[in-house]
Amino acid sequence: MPETVTRDQLAELLNEDLSREYQAIIAYVVYSQVLKGAEYMNIADQLVKHAHQELEHALIISRQIDYLGKMPTVTPKPVKTSEQARDMLRFDLDNENETILNYQERIRQCETLSEFAMAEQIREILVQEQDHQIDLATALGEDVPDVSRLRKRG
């Protein structure tokens, strides 16, 4: 059963999501430029595309927060950096996993409030976030994480 939230609470949660989108934009911009080595050139190119997509996500989420009558946040979540390419990709993958879990929950919350159009907008974002997750897991030579298992932890 989805957690029942008010419209104001949904706006607050979307602002947390927006902070995570800002974090992703910053991370992808930086990581795409500092990843070194032939084995990382393909994923570096992918991260440039991810940065553009995350900006689109931030615009969509901001519009939804405004629609709910609240002011979109201007503060990103902290961005981790590392000298190690694998660490940067791991940070990205961990963030995508968290984002996917949150958007799955946000869709359920929107539908509980009969905000079906908003749920549809977030579903479209979720598709891209899962593509990012696949790209990052592949670059790390790992299977795509099962986020349903992560939900039970968190």
Image (cartoon, rainbow, N blue to C red):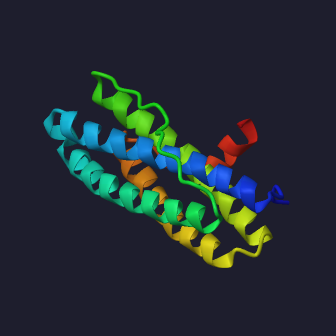
| Left or right of residue 59: residue 42 | left
Q: Residue furthest left?
A: 38
Is residue 145 visible in this depiction of the protein? no
The quadrant the N terminus occupies is: bottom right
Residue 18 x, y percent position in the rendering? 52, 50
Measuring 57% from the left and 53% from the top, which residue is drawn there? 100
Front residue of 141/104: it is: 104
**Where residue 151 appears, x then y in whole percent?**
70, 44
Extreme-top residue of the structure = 83
> Residue 71, located in which quarter of the rendered image?
bottom right
Q: Quadrant of the C terminus?
A: top right
Please say if 30 is above or below 63: above
- Residue drawn at the location 50% of the way across and 41% of the way down: 95
Q: Is residue 105 left or right of residue 53?
A: right
At 43% from the left and 62% from the top, the residue drawn is: 59
Work out whether residue 79 or residue 138 is closer to the camera in this orientation and state it.
Answer: 79
Task: Identify the residue at image location x=28%, y=57%.
Answer: 49
One can see residue 73 in this view: yes
Q: Residue 128: x and y, percent?
A: 44, 62
Horizontal and vertical percent position of residue 105: 69, 56
Does residue 62 appear left or right of residue 80 in this picture? right
Q: Is residue 86 left or right of residue 42?
A: right
Relative to the observer, which residue lies in front, 52 or 83? 52
Q: Nearer the viewer, residue 23 or 93?
A: 23
Instruction: Count the marks.
Output: 0
